[in-house]
Amino acid sequence: MIGKIAYVFVLFLSITACVTKKVDVKSTNAPVIDGKLVKNISEFKVAVETLQPGDEIVLANGVWTDTELKFYGKGTAEKPIILRVQEKGKVFLEGQSNIRIGGAYMHVEGLVFRNGHTPSGAVIAFRKDKEMPCNNCRVTECVIDDYNPSERFDSDYWVEIYGKNNRFDHNYLVGKRNRGVTLAVRMKTEADRENHHRIDHNYFGYHPILGSNGGETLRVGTSHYSLSNSNTTVEDNYFEHCNGELEIISSKSCQNTFRNNTFYECQGTLTMRHGNETLVENNYFFANRKANTGGIRIINESQTVRNNYLQGITGHRFRGTLVVMNGVPNSPLNRYFQVKNSEASNNLVIDCDHIQLCAGSDEERSATPIDTKMTNNIFYNTKKDDVFTVYDDISGIEFDGNLLSTNIVFPKNKGKKLEKGFAAETLEFIEKDGIKRSKSHPNIGPDQSKPRPGRDNTGLSWYPKKDYQVRFNTGKVIPAYPGENTILEAVKKSSKGDIIRLMGTGQYHGSKAISIPHTLTIEAGSGLEGKPQLTFERSSLFNIENGGSLTLKGLEVSGAECDDYAGNTVVRTSRYSMINNYKLMIQDCNFKDLDVNHSFNVLKVYKNTFADSILLDNSTFENISGHVLNLDKEIDDTGIYNVENVVIRNCKFNDIGGVALNLYRGGRDESTFGPILDLHDTTFDNIGHDKRNKYKASVSLHGVQYADMRNLNFNEVKKVNLHLIVGDPIIKIENAQFTNSEELISNDDAYQSTNIIYKNRN
Ligand code: CA
């Protein structure tokens, strides 16, 4: 540790020293710089050839396209070799660029990767090649911004750390969209283990839902080497909306430390997936009651989870607030080791919904936690009484000194309430700097003497932070009037977030398909008597291209004027992989007469596309020969699917030949949350009877992990089909009436049904 501090200190001195030996470059506007200024890759390569301790290479301002930097050499602790930029924020690596760093005491600063993707397996690799890892190297103040390939399942890493004693700090990584961990600590060879890397003060920004395993923001090790020590420290980082998958962080090696990090509204957990003796302390989780947010998941031996602050976390099961897993007896490396000799203490848990004990208990995961302690934690949630879920025998967990708000029901073991180890107390809190602290037990919770990581004290200051979320109605209003291709013309003039407002109730006819390249709303103007009518003649009306999202509001869409071909659709996604997730919102619309030929759909999706959300609200769908929502294009059964959230409310489906809704997620992978369905106050009349409806269902849910269905009317419909496979799906159906219809069927009775009525006409 002293060595590390000395190195950082020396480095600081050397940078300071450099500033004093200014070398003027013969350029009018360029600032004075030190080191060897290089203007292209050839000059860079020449400069690398002769690097000596203390040397500096400076990348000239400008855009470096398709530039693969191999920066290697042997610096010393006193004289590292430095690669930096002429001016921060004015040097960009674009197209197919990357950097590999090899040798020792190499220092990289100020690179920005954007507008492209790495041609290799990593954007930044801490090794030149297999033979030359990097030791005692540092990457600081670098940016990787939305630097993704076009194929969402072509995998790469943004940062791969090999070697030993490396530091990755004050970087800004945002918008990882394809498969592959954002930052991985690799442990492939002896030279990569017991590495003592330090990952600190980074800003890990928005990581959208991948809809598959492989969307972790940080991974330390892999199952294969998980019983080796990594000794990586992850501290003082800020994680914001890191929603890629179940694991925000996957610790897969021994003796790692995760300390003083902030997790802001992240849909996932810090998971001790493999490996032992990991310390998780003084972290802050601010979930603000966002859906699917999680906390800390404990697996394996000798894990310590202490003095963390967890607030407003809503996720359940594997993304609970505090999750202690069951293990597999004699587990292979890649499954679940039993929790042993572990501890969760002094954690302050405020307004969180689910503490999960023996989570994952099933026939395979039957080894309950042993020699484990939960002590002196505060669990405070006045709005929810049943915070604890006990899935198996918890007699191997010793409870002591835990405080509960007075409403919370004590956990039970084998049906018997635990009297020992818990006390109900009227807890009062003092709030300071956004943190609640108990008046009577001020020592429970995080040590606030160290600055808490946030947006302003992590990453770097010189690169703008954009909003990466899809947001509707943030731009200008563009009017459109009845006529031919008037919507298309308005779309061509639009930019992200704009609203195209249809100013009259007449016919808007599309003789060409309309590409939606960005987030757009197409809506009826206010005060119209009736809905503007959209007709079209091509095989689709709207094509949501990569980067596009669409809201349709207050419109009538008719397929009566379409060309007489099979397989028309109102909306389709790109036919190619979409690296950007999209949203489709249909509100107050009427879809009708989609029946000029067979298999006419409302929405047609393609493989390798993913919707964050699809909403059908207060709309009618009638006289349709194909499907309304058929989301089944990921059929490899590897836990990949087409949509995260589907909401259907206050809708009417009449005379639909295919399915009203088909959601498909195959395979048993447990890394994702979705698909998630909210379906209510909706009627289904004459659905699914077309002979081409191969699903032979009106509504089919396969591998859906959460479905809340209520107040539904089914009349003359094919079956409602439930196929429960992944984990413990929560499927609820309440107040459903089936008249003269096939029955609801399920492969498993583990769903909740209330008030389901079947009536038959005679
Ligand atoms: Ca994972």
Image: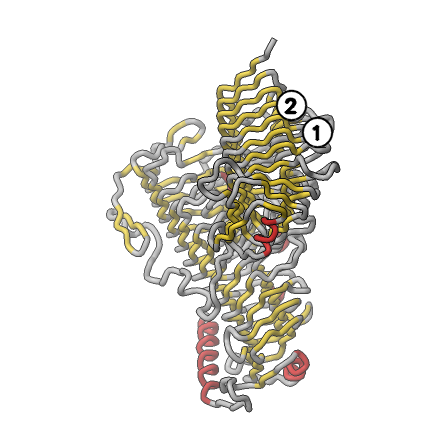
Name the residue at 24% across, 48% down.
Answer: 439
Name the residue at 32% across, 41% down.
Answer: 403
- Contact (Cβ within 8 Å) of mark 2 with mark 1: yes
Task: Find residue 262 and report its image quarter.
Answer: bottom left
Where's residue 299, x and y in %? 52, 46
Task: Find residue 668 and report its image quarter.
Answer: top right
Q: Nearer the viewer, residue 58 or 145?
A: 145
Tag 2: residue type? Answer: Lys
Where's residue 500, x and y in %? 52, 49
The circle drawn on residue 164 is none
Relative vertical location of residue 732 with respect to residue 497 in this rendering, above or below: above
Q: Nearer the viewer, residue 357 or 522?
A: 522
Where's residue 301, x and y in %? 51, 48
Residue with the mark numbered 2: 718
Relative vertical location of residue 329 with respect to residue 185 in this rendering, above or below: above
Q: Is residue 213 left or right of residue 529?
A: right
Q: Residues within 10 Å of mark 1 (few under 14, many from 20)?
A: some
Helix, strand or loop at label 1? It is loop
